[in-house]
């Protein structure tokens, strides 16, 4: 997953650097926004996964006690 993300970032950076020759905008801010959205998505997925595992562990502990 890390390799895919790195390749996508490189591809986007390459495309943006090509566009920056024609259009006047800051490519670094676009890449920063892109990376931030990836990090937020990954964070929310991980949070959801950990929450499900914690609920599963709580159910297992509750059933073991009773």
Image: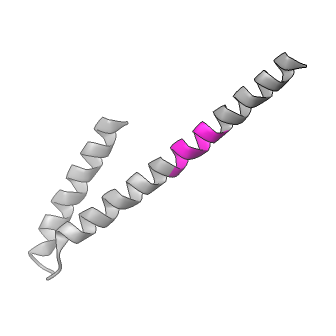
Residue 55 versus residue 11 in the image, above or below: above
Q: Nearer the viewer, residue 4 or 42?
A: 42
Nearer to us in this view, 30 or 18:
30
- Residue farthest to the front, as pictured: 65
- Counting from the top left corner in percent of width and height, residue 18 is at 13, 67
Residue for point 85% across, 18% down: 65
Image-quadrant location for residue 5: top left
The magenta region covers: 44-51
Left or right for 53, reference 25 = right
Question: What residue occupies the far right of the structure in this picture?
Answer: 66
What is the residue that sits farthest to the left in this orientation? 21
Q: Residue furthest bottom?
A: 24
Q: Quadrant of residue 52?
A: top right
Instruction: Judge whether residue 47 is colored magenta.
Output: yes
Residue 49, magenta (yes or no): yes
Residue 57 spot, x, y in % from top left: 70, 27
Q: Is residue 38 above or below residue 48?
A: below
Image quadrant where residue 48 sits: top right
Point out the image quarter for the C terminus: top right
């Amino acid at each position: 997953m890390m390799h895919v993300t790195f390749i996508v970032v490189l591809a986007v950076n390459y495309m943006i650097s090509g566009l920056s020759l024609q259009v006047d905008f800051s490519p670094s801010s676009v890449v920063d926004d892109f990376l931030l959205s990836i990090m937020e998505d990954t964070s929310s997925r991980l949070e959801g996964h950990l929450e499900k595992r914690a609920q599963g562990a709580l159910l297992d502990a509750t059933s073991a006690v009773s």
